[in-house]
Amino acid sequence: MKTEIATLAGGCFWCIEVVFDELNGVQSVESGYTGGRIPNPSYQIIGTGLTGHAEALQVTFDADVISYADLLRVFFAVHDPTTLNRQGNDVGTQYRSAVFYHDNAQKETAEQVIREVNDAKVWKNPIVTELAAYDVFYIAESYHQEYYVNNPNQGYCKVVIEPKVAKFRKQFVDKLKKKQTA
């Protein structure tokens, strides 16, 4: 087993956490905050957009089962990486698209996957995802963890997250954990 960590921001962490949880090779996913200026931020303070933090995920995965490049391909498919500081109705720097790379190999892979997605014209506009060196990750409050799983009937989950998850499952059926394909 080759355990690695990916730190990704793609808008509201509720919207993408469930996707990564379902990928074969992913061991754990934590919602939290990264890329900001103050230590130990709370949801309320990052919600102001003044701290520089992004809502993000820390994804621990087995690189022998799923590659970092494949994680990024999923990442670029499940959110709109072409909108600056916005995902749908969520607006502000805390909702930006960002890859916080842990080493030069991750940075180079991210650059390569961005070129690949842009060249394939997956999105109408070019990717504006920030590439930044990883510094520190703060785990979000417990009620944010597994939000979709714990609140499937909540309005935001039904209207925003559920269609995104359905599209993901169809597009990446070959990457899902076995329990999801049965």
Image: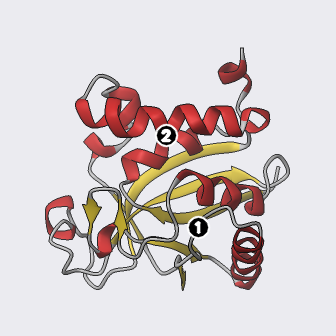
What residue is shown at x 25% (from left), y 81% (from top)?
A: 38
Q: CA distance from mark 1 to mark 2?
A: 18 Å
Picture quarter containing residue 105?
Answer: bottom right
- Say above or below: 1 vs 53: above
| Kind of residue indicated by mark 2 | Lys
Picture quarter containing residue 110?
Answer: bottom right
Of residues 39 and 105, which is closer to you in this image?
A: 105
Query: Taking 166 as reference, is 171 left or right?
Result: right
Picture quarter containing residue 127?
Answer: bottom right
What residue is shown at x 37% (from left), y 46% (from top)?
A: 14
Query: Taking 1 as reference, is 10 left or right?
Result: left
Of residues 66 and 74, which is closer to you in this image?
A: 74
Q: Residue furthest front?
A: 124
- Say above or below: 118 vs 170: below
- Say above or below: 118 vs 70: below
What residue is shown at x 70% (from left), y 58% (from top)?
A: 73
Residue on which the image places disc 2? 164
The C terminus lies in quadrant: top right
Instruction: Give residue 137's position: percent from left, percent from top.
Output: 42, 68
Residue on which the image places disc 1? 124
Instruction: Give residue 157's position: percent from left, percent from top.
Output: 33, 34
| Kind of residue indicated by mark 1 | Lys
Q: Secondary structure at mark 2?
A: helix
Of residues 111 and 127, which is closer to you in this image?
A: 127
Query: Taking 51 as reference, is 100 left or right?
Result: right
Instruction: Give residue 81's position: percent from left, percent from top.
Output: 52, 67
- Say above or below: 3 vs 86: above
Q: Please tell me how crowded label 1 is: few (under 14), some (14-19), or many (20+) other residues with Cα within 10 Å.
A: few
Q: Secondary structure at mark 1?
A: loop
